[in-house]
Image (cartoon, rainbow, N blue to C red):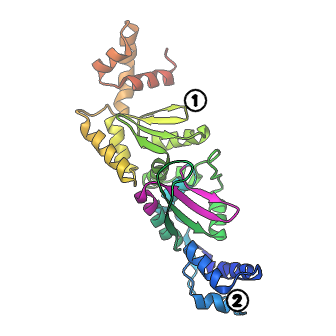
Amino acid sequence: MMEYFDLRQEAYNKTIELNKSGLSWYKISNHFDELGYKIPHSTIRSWTRGSKARNKEPLINFSSSLSKEESYALGVIGPGDGYIADANYEIGLAVIDKDFADYFQFCLEKVFRLRTSNKLEGPSGLGKNPRYRVKLYSKKICEYLTKRYKVNFKEESWRIPEIIKESNEEIKGAYLSGFSDSQGHVSKREIILASKNVDGLKEIKCLLDSLDILFTLSENKGIISIYGKNSFEIFNNKIGFATKRKADKLICIINSYKRNMTPKKIINNKMIEIIKYLKEGNTKLQASKIFGVHRLTISKKLKEMGVD
């Protein structure tokens, strides 16, 4: 089943509104050009002179199934650097990485089949680097996102849509990729995902768990720390970064490891022996070397098991 939105009619209504406010057809046409809508000048002129919008143009359609491109866009718009501005029905993103902006633009245009704008802006008060700003204006699409996914997209209160949680690994990975391109960075031995929305991070935690990725969640700091070569490889294969500088750094870290970290199932099987070893007076660092399990992983597992 498909949902159809006649965005041409929406453009017509906006044209009439702007014309009544005093704008000429030429200024209205330029306004649409700046927003990324390529409507012929002759069409705008005819609308301001009394012609009606005709329905012979193809309508924009949205599939009821969820694509990885839409999932990625949701990961950017909700928990990530993207936004929905309700006041002017704008979906946008402003970032310093061109490849990130370009891929977000690609996803929007593939899903919604509309032209978007992607322009380089001067530095803002938030930093010294210029930013690439992607914009898409549509009341219908903003309403569609809110109605379909039934979640808050605000930075301080976003949630993961249920359809993402119930989807396959490809869809989950695409959502996490959008979030990671926005809120993630790669350090010497960990991938950090950050958000002030701790309840939202707990939902991110569930997605990572479903992909067998090892991590710790620090609620007071609002960060998730992913660690271990196996987890990095899973992240790279199932999630990944569209931002090249982050992707390249992750590959360098993976290649720097001399041995694999222990898979999750093997760790669980080793915990009984590790606990016995610790009760004999040995330290977690010593246990890490003996059993081949990272010290932070041992601490996390002990906490989960309620063992001091």
The N terminus - image quarter: bottom right
Q: Residues within 10 Å of mark 2 (few under 14, many from 20)?
A: many
Q: At x 33% / y 25%, what residue is drawn?
A: 293
Q: Is residue 228 above or below residue 22?
A: above
Look at the image and give the residue range highlighted in magenta: 80-103
Query: As rendered, which of 155 and 145 lies closer to the eye?
Result: 155
Check if residue 96 falls in the magenta segment. yes
List x then y, in percent, for residue 276. Answer: 38, 12
Dot 2 lies on which element?
helix
Q: Is 161 placed left or right of 260 in the picture? A: right
List x then y, in percent, for residue 303. Answer: 50, 22
Pointers 2 and 1 in contact (C-beta within 8 Å)? no
Q: How far is mark 2 from mark 1, CA to CA?
A: 57 Å
Q: Is residue 145 above or below residue 286?
A: below
Check if residue 74 falls in the magenta segment. no
Query: As rendered, which of 90 and 133 lies closer to the eye?
Result: 133
Q: Which mark is residue 48?
A: 2
Q: Is residue 183 above or below residue 111?
A: above
Residue ranking furthest to the right: 20
Q: Amino acid at mark 1?
A: Asn
Q: Is 236 placed left or right of 68 in the picture? A: left
Q: Quadrant of residue 258?
A: top left
